[in-house]
C-alpha cells in the first residue's frame, strides 16, 4: 500500500494528469477510512478541474476546497480565505491539486511559508513522457525549476504519470519508467511511484506501481 | 515528430500551424483559446517566427491582413467575442482575395456570454463573417488529431482559392487532451504567390492588394468572379463523415464536440436495436449537401444536434429541400448535450427497432 504524508502537493506541467492523480489519491485515502480534504488550487485552467468533481468527492466524505468561482463563467483567479486553513495543523490528509507550470504554481507561493514549516509533507512533481514539451528529463527539469521559482516550494519526490489516455499500452509504461528514473536522478529526487491505469496493472511486472482510474475526461 | 503525444486541442492547433509553414501569429488572449497563443509565444521564437500580442483583436486581425498580403502564411486565433472584433478585417481579406487562417474556439454568447464551450457562432462563421458578399472556408474538427489535419488543409485551400479559412472549434475541443501525431513540416514546399506585395525588385509590375473599387461596375464584376470560384469550391471541397447511415431510419447531423456526443448516442441507439446513423459535416462552408441529399433518399427523419439554439439546422433543411422532417436538439450558453439526452430525442422521433 502506497503511503502518503499528511500533506501531499501535486505539481507539474499543464496537462500531465495532476487533477486525475489528485482525485485518485484523495479517493484512495478516503477508502482507507482516512479523513481527507482535497484542495483545487488551480487558478489558470478553465475546464477539467478538481472542483468539477465536487459531488463525487463529497459523496465519499472528502472535503473540497476550491476557488469561489470554479465551474462558473467567471474567469476570476481568486482563492477563498478558507484555503489558508488547510495548511493549519490537523488530522486530515490534505491533497493539493496545483495549476500547471509556473503560471499555475504561482498561487501556491502565497502559502509557501506555511507549507515550508510543515514537516509531514510531500511535494510531488508529476511527469508524463507522452505530454508534448516534457518528453526529455532536461525539459522536465527546466519546467520544475520554473515551478519552484514561482511557488517558492521545493519538490521532494517525482511521480511518473506517463500515459496516452485510453491508448496507453504496457510497452508505453515500461519505456516511461526508464525516463522517469533518469528524470528523478537528474533532479536528485526519489521516484515515488509510476501511476498506471487499473486495466493495465495486472499485465505489468514492475515494482512501485500505483493503480488509478480515468476520472477526468470529456462528457462523451 | 512522428511519435504520438498528448496535446490539448489549442496546443495542437498551434503546433500544426507551425508545421504547416506558418511563421507569423498575431493574437490577443481570450479564454478558452489562450493556450494557443501561449504555445505560439514559446514556439515561434524557436523556429524563427513571429509571435505578436497586439493591442486588440482588431489590430491582430489587420496585422494578419498585412502579413498575408506580403505572401506569408499568417494566422490569428480567438474565441467568440474576439472573432466579432476581427470580422471587419476578415471582410477586407475576402475583399482583397488574401488567404489567412482564423481560429475560433467558440464559447457561450451573445455578448461576453461565458467561458464554457458553445457552437453558437455557426451563422457568423458560415453566413456573415463580416459585411459584404463573401464566403470563407469553414472547417469543423471533432478530434484533436483532426484539428491538426485540418489546419494544414485550411492553409492549403486558403492559398489555392485565395480566401480566408476558419477552423471553427469550441472550448471543449480546445481544452481537452488527446493523443496526436503531428506531421513533420520540415520538407514543406509552400506555393508561389505571384500576387503578393513582397517587393518587385524592378523585375515585375508592382502588385496591389486592395478592397476599394471606384466604380460599381468593377466591383460587381469582381464579386461575380469570386462567386464563380465559390461554385467550384462547393463542387469540389465538401467534406463529411458518414457513420452507420446506410440502413439508418434516423440520421443525426452534428459537427465538432456535438458530433462526439451524437456518435456515442448513435452507438447507444444501435445497442437498443434502433437504426440510427450520423452525418458529421467537416466542412461547414462549403456545406456537405451531397452527403445529406444522398442520405435523404433512404432516411426517414433527421435530427440536428448543436450547442446552440439551432443554426446549422437551416443548412440541413436547405440541403435536402425539406424533403424529410428535420428535428432539433440543442443545449446552449456553455452547456453540452449528453449522449443520453440525444438518445432520448432519437427515441422520441420514433426510432424503430
Image (cartoon, rainbow, N blue to C red):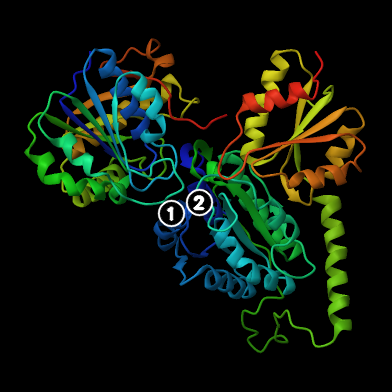
Distance between the Cα atoms at labels 1 and 2?
A: 8 Å
Q: Is residue B46 visible?
A: yes
Q: Mark 1 lies on which chain?
A: B
Q: Which of B306 and B167 is in front in this view?
A: B306
Residue B264 in which image quadrant: top right
Q: Which chain carries label 2?
A: B
B177 in relation to B269, above or below: below
The image shows residue B22 at horizontal and vertical percentages of 55, 61
Q: Along the polypeptide, which appears first: circle 1 or circle 2?
A: 2
A219 in relation to B308, above or below: above
The image shows residue B44 at horizontal and vertical percentages of 44, 61
Which residue carries the number 2 mark? Answer: B15
Q: Which residue is drawn at 70% across and 70% down?
A: B91
Q: What element carries label 1?
A: helix
Quarter of the image where the C terminus of chain A is located: top right
Q: Residue at x 61, y 33 (%)?
A: B337
Q: Nearer the viewer, residue B222 or A74?
A: A74
Say left or right for B8 vs B160: left
The image shows residue B229 at horizontal and vertical percentages of 84, 63
The image shows residue A121 at horizontal and vertical percentages of 13, 31
Q: What element carries label 2?
A: helix
Q: Which residue is drawn at 56% across and 60% down?
A: B81
- Asked if the residue at tag 2 contacts the one at tag 1, i.e. Cβ–Cβ closer than 8 Å, the answer is yes
Q: Nearer the viewer, mark 1 or mark 2?
A: 1
Which residue carries the number 1 mark? Answer: B39
Q: Which residue is drawn at 58% across and 67% down?
A: B85
Amino acid at each position: 500500500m502506497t503511503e502518503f504524508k499528511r500533506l501531499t502537493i501535486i505539481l507539474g506541467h499543464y496537462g500531465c494528469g495532476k487533477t486525475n492523480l489528485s482525485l485518485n489519491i484523495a479517493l484512495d485515502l478516503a477508502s482507507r477510512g482516512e479523513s481527507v480534504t482535497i484542495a483545487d488550487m488551480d487558478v489558470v485552467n478553465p475546464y477539467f478541474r478538481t472542483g468539477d468533481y465536487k459531488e463525487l468527492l463529497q459523496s465519499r466524505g472528502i472535503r473540497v476546497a476550491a476557488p469561489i468561482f470554479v465551474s462558473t463563467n467567471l474567469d476570476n483567479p481568486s482563492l477563498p480565505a478558507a484555503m489558508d486553513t488547510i495548511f493549519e495543523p490537523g488530522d486530515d490528509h490534505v491533497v493539493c491539486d496545483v495549476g500547471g507550470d509556473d503560471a499555475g504554481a504561482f498561487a501556491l507561493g502565497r502559502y509557501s511559508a506555511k507549507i515550508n514549516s510543515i514537516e509531514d509533507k510531500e511535494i510531488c512533481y508529476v511527469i508524463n513522457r507522452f505530454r508534448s514539451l516534457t518528453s526529455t528529463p532536461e525539459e522536465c527539469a527546466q519546467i520544475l525549476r520554473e515551478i519552484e521559482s514561482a511557488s517558492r516550494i521545493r519538490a521532494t519526490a517525482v511521480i511518473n504519470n506517463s500515459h496516452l489516455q485510453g491508448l496507453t499500452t504496457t510497452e508505453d509504461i515500461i519505456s516511461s519508467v526508464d525516463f522517469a528514473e533518469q528524470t528523478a536522478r537528474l533532479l536528485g529526487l526519489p521516484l515515488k511511484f509510476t501511476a498506471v491505469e487499473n486495466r493495465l496493472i495486472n499485465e505489468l511486472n514492475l515494482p512501485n506501481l500505483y493503480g488509478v482510474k480515468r476520472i477526468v475526461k470529456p462528457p462523451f | 515528430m512522428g511519435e504520438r503525444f498528448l496535446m490539448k486541442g489549442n496546443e495542437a492547433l498551434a503546433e500544426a500551424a507551425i508545421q504547416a509553414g506558418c511563421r507569423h501569429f498575431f493574437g490577443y488572449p481570450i479564454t478558452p483559446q489562450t493556450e494557443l497563443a501561449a504555445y505560439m509565444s514559446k514556439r515561434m521564437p524557436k523556429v524563427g517566427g513571429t509571435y505578436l500580442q497586439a493591442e486588440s483583436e482588431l489590430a491582430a486581425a489587420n496585422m494578419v491582413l498585412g502579413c498575408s498580403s506580403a505572401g506569408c502564411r499568417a494566422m490569428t486565433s480567438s474565441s467568440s467575442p474576439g472573432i466579432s472584433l476581427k470580422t471587419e478585417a476578415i471582410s477586407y481579406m475576402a475583399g482583397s482575395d488574401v488567404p489567412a487562417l482564423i481560429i475560433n474556439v467558440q464559447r457561450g454568447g451573445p455578448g461576453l456570454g461565458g467561458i464554457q464551450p458553445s457552437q453558437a457562432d455557426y451563422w457568423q462563421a458560415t453566413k456573415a463573417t463580416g459585411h459584404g458578399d463573401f464566403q470563407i472556408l469553414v472547417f469543423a474538427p471533432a478530434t484533436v488529431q483532426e484539428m491538426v489535419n485540418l489546419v494544414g488543409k485550411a492553409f492549403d485551400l486558403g492559398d489555392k482559392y485565395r480566401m480566408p479559412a476558419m477552423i471553427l472549434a469550441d472550448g471543449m475541443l480546445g481544452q481537452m487532451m488527446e493523443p496526436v501525431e503531428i506531421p513533420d513540416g520540415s520538407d514543406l514546399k509552400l506555393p508561389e504567390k505571384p500576387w503578393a506585395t513582397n517587393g518587385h525588385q524592378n523585375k515585375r509590375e508592382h502588385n496591389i492588394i486592395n478592397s476599394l473599387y471606384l466604380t460599381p461596375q468593377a466591383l460587381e464584376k469582381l464579386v461575380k468572379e469570386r462567386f464563380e470560384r465559390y461554385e467550384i469550391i462547393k463542387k469540389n471541397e465538401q467534406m463529411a463523415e458518414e457513420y452507420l447511415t446506410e440502413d439508418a431510419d434516423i440520421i443525426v447531423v452534428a459537427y465538432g464536440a456535438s458530433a462526439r456526443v451524437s456518435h456515442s448516442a448513435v452507438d447507444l441507439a444501435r445497442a437498443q436495436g434502433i437504426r440510427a446513423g450520423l452525418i458529421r459535416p467537416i466542412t461547414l462552408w462549403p456545406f456537405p449537401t451531397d452527403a445529406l441529399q444522398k442520405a435523404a433518399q433512404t432516411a426517414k427523419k433527421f435530427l440536428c444536434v448543436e450547442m446552440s439554439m439551432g443554426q446549422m439546422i437551416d443548412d440541413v433543411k436547405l440541403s435536402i429541400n425539406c424533403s424529410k422532417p428535420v428535428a432539433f436538439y440543442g443545449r446552449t450558453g456553455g452547456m453540452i448535450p449528453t449522449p443520453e439526452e440525444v438518445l432520448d430525442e432519437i427515441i422520441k422521433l420514433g426510432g424503430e427497432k
